[in-house]
Image (cartoon, helix red, strand yellow):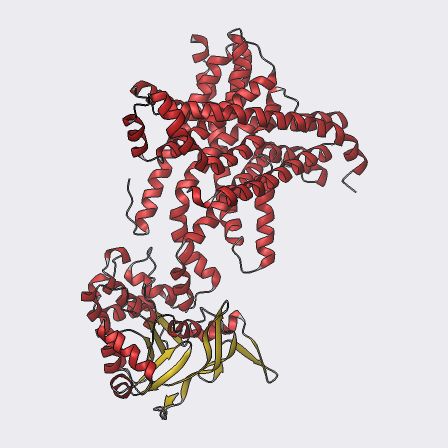
Amino acid sequence: MIWDWEYAIDVLPALAEASLVTLAATFWGFFFALIIGLVLALLRRSQIWLIRASTGFFVEFVRSTPLLVQLYLLYFGLPQIGITMTPFTVGVIGLAVHVGAYISEVYRAGLDNVPAGQLEAATALNFDSYRRMMFIILPQAIPPIIPALDNYLVLMFKDTSLLSAIAVVEMLQLAKILGSESFRFLEPMTIVGVFFIVMSLLAASGIRYVEARVGRGST
Amino acid sequence: MDNVLNYVPELIEATAITIQLTLAIIIVAFVAALVAGSARLSRWRIVRLVAGIYVEVFRGASALIILFWIYYALPFFGVSLDAYMAAVIGLGLNSGAYGAEIVRGAILAVPKGQYEAATALNFTSLQRLRYVILPQAIVMMMPPFGNKCVEILKATSLVSLITLTDLTARGKQLATITFQPIEVFLIVLVIYFVIASIISFVMRRLEAALARNVGRRVVA
Amino acid sequence: MATETPIADGEPIIRFDKVRKCFGDHNVLDQLDLVVTRGEKLAIIGPSGSGKSTILRILMTLEPIDGGVVEIAGEPLWHLRRNGSLVPADEKHLRRMRRHIGMVFQHFNLFPHMTALGNVTAALTHVLKMPKKEAEERGVQLLHRVGLADKLNSRPSQLSGGQQQRVAIARALAMRPSIMMFDEATSALDPELVGEVLNVMRDLAHEHDLTMVIVTHQMGFAGEICDRVSFIDSGRIVEEGPPDRVLKQPREQRTQSFLRAVLDS
């Protein structure tokens, strides 16, 4: 038999532990991506043309270039200007900026969908621009886009595997290490693959559940 | 910065590999998407099931995991692919699984009357798909496929992790040689950005041309 | 049911025998019996939701039946005879049976990515495997017949509704069916475009051998070209007979009130 159960069970605990790194990177990456995305979306609505344009270009640039190269730029580039961080931190920043650029487009759609009359009403009530955004616009813009954001959580989860390229020992990196030690890649790689597929499927059904509950009325 | 610019020709050379891979993967992904997307709507349950499993597996695992699995684990089943083939097949099937959902959505968006008219004219279900449904569905697929092509370009960077010397791999080597990673990787990113912009432009043109062919008016 | 002996000099080409069709709990057709003879021109009228379109869709094999038997030219449409009993038909049988029938839809359903001529010839070349040249000859001739000789290379999007429907009629005729069905063929048209489509249908009605089944709201037109009118309500034939009789002196109360409502509007 090709598949070695004994070896598979042997490597399972270590991979399970590494899955915590994967999940932690997903969580923190997504947390910061939500913030970065919002900031980018707000900057794109700035009254200053230059800020709008450069933010737009930045988002487009990040979205059309590979995450792997962006990670390399941070990982190898930051020390060049004297900033040193753990690979995990660099990875989380890279993920957050990359996915944050995508998420900013989702926010943008949500913001655009708030009727112009709301802004006018808030202005008529003499809200300043910060309070207008905080108390009138965002509370209306964000709930409808929550289902769309979930998809980016799944995207983020899958993208964490790229952290293996900058020496973060998440699941895939560990599988590679284990494989090169034992010359058996099949079992660790397959376990990682199955873990990702199962998690993606779980997340997808979770999203369907959320959409069914929040959904309909929000579109 | 000066000495980094000297390396630009080398980066451009590696870009050829990246472009070549992108095109090969787009073709594999397009075929896989059409077949799997249509199969998901088949009359036969078993065909739907197989296509469904393909889509879930190849979408569920990340592109890099699929790439590594094909490159490192598949040889244990006696199938050894060189890095180039592993990249084209692995990334092609991964993108194809996403594409299958686009195809499925587009096919479902073709009005029911078109199916009925084709049935009334006694087309077989395969003829109906080929001559009536797909030509109309393809127009609807084009905008999301355009985005997908840029995603494929980005995904080719992963091949550097299975020993291929594409733009990303060459950039990484040069960054080490020159000790100027920021400059090198910025140039690499700009090259990717330029290619992505060209892809978007071409796809939009193609989109408009196809839409005209179906007799729809397009807002350009 | 008020029926006089139908104009049954010809052989029956369509026969519904206790046909039942339901959508969920709703019985659209309820033990429906219907016979159409070869060459007959039948109009089916009735309120919306009465099941009249369903009759056409069943004949076109777009909707399966839930009970009873439908026969075309003496052969069961939805069943195969096997060892003396009836078993559900397979796709091969349905494809063989569909050759008898052509259908014109309310919303035309032209293929938007083909020219008018392409629409007419598509099934000839792909389904009948006719050589392209021969198919185009037939297509040109038919488009000529429906008055669109100058629109051969126009896309559906460049044609008016009336022109599109005439292409759709030519497309169905190209397959040389022995039964032509029209499912509210003029309902989606602007009033000024109805006439040109009715003219084509009127012209077809002169073909002695062609059986026509027309679902319509155009009572005058139905009376003019049809041999028989069937009034359907709640999935059953309430009343049928020669148009002059059914449309002008309906016997059933439901027919009377339906006709009154239609004529008032």
Which image quarter: residue C238?
Answer: bottom left
Left or right, A74 with respect to C176, comes to right
The residue depicted at 24 percent of the width and 56 percent of the height is C158
Q: Nearer the viewer, residue A107 or C119?
A: A107
Spot occupied by residue B2 in the image (x, y as percentages of width and height): 42, 8
Which image quarter: residue C133?
Answer: bottom left
Spot occupied by residue C51 in the image (x, y as percentages of width and height): 40, 73
Q: Residue furthest right?
A: A6
Whether residue B194 can be seen here: no
The residue depicted at 61 percent of the width and 36 percent of the height is B66
Left or right, B82 with respect to B156, comes to right
Left or right, B4 with respect to A194, comes to left
The residue depicted at 37 percent of the width and 67 percent of the height is C124
Q: Nearer the viewer, residue B112 or B72?
A: B112
Q: Quadrant of the N terminus of chain C?
A: bottom left
Q: Residue furthest top?
A: A82
Left or right, B219 with respect to C80, comes to left
Spot occupied by residue C2 in the image (x, y as percentages of width and height): 37, 89
Whether residue C96 is situated above or below residue C115 in the rendered picture: below
The residue depicted at 55 percent of the width and 36 percent of the height is B91
Q: Quadrant of the C terminus of chain C?
A: bottom left
Whether residue B2 is situated above or below residue A36 in the rendered picture: above
Q: Residue furthest left?
A: C192
Whether residue C244 can be seen here: yes
Q: Nearer the viewer, residue B112 or B213?
A: B112
